Amino acid sequence: MFGSAVTALKDAKEVAKDVGDIELKEKIGTAYDTLLELKVRLYEVDDENRRLKRALEDQTKYTDPLPPFGYVYRTDDAEHKNPLCPRCYQNTPQKIGFLKAPHKAPTGVFRHCPVCSTNVPETTPTRPPMTNKKVTPYWE
């Protein structure tokens, strides 16, 4: 497509040389430059299109957030044993970090992400229990 347009412009430029019309030569040169700029832009758009297609294919490799914790899983993880870290998954650029097995802490149950070091709660965080120490006022 571009090849035939470039060839036509070159032919027109040769004809313009024989005629000796400087203004016509300038307009053909401008059209030629514009055509080359369009060719460069077409390559850029094609590269962007390929990148977006790859990103879309990558996105279909994961499930939508699933209850009860809203974790995202790889589609090949049918048993949903290895959730992705929500923080890594939602970052830009996207990282893929798998959460470790749940561990119990004094403040609740959490999963740890080794990529971003986030602790993701699986229960509502609780406060540590208060001690039964009697507090004496400072004036006593």
Image (tube, grey):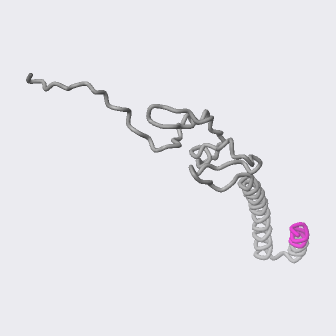
Quadrant of the rendered structure where residue 6 is? bottom right
Residue 9 on the magenta span:
yes
Looking at the magenta stretch, what is its main secondary structure?
helix
**Residue ID at (21%, 25%):** 134
Q: Which residues are magenta?
A: 1-10
Q: Nearer the viewer, residue 56 or 86?
A: 86
Q: Position of residue 96 (x, y in %)?
A: 66, 42
Q: Position of residue 116 (x, y in %)?
A: 57, 36
Q: Position of residue 49 (x, y in %)?
A: 75, 60
Q: Residue furthest top?
A: 140
Q: Position of residue 97 (x, y in %)?
A: 65, 39
**Residue ID at (52%, 37%):** 109
Q: Left or right of 120: which side holds 100?
A: right
Q: Nearer the viewer, residue 119 or 137?
A: 137
Q: Residue furthest front?
A: 132
Quadrant of the frame with the C terminus = top left
Residue 64 on the magenta span:
no
Quadrant of the rendered structure where residue 135 is? top left
> How many numbered tags mark residues here?
0
Q: Left or right of 134: which side holds 29?
A: right
Q: Left or right of 66: which side holds 51?
A: right
- Where 53 falls versus 74 (above or below)? below
- Where 83 falls versus 136 (above or below)? below
Q: Left or right of 92: which side holds 51?
A: right
Q: Nearer the viewer, residue 64 or 68?
A: 68
Quadrant of the frame with the N terminus = bottom right
Q: Nearer the viewer, residue 76 or 36?
A: 76
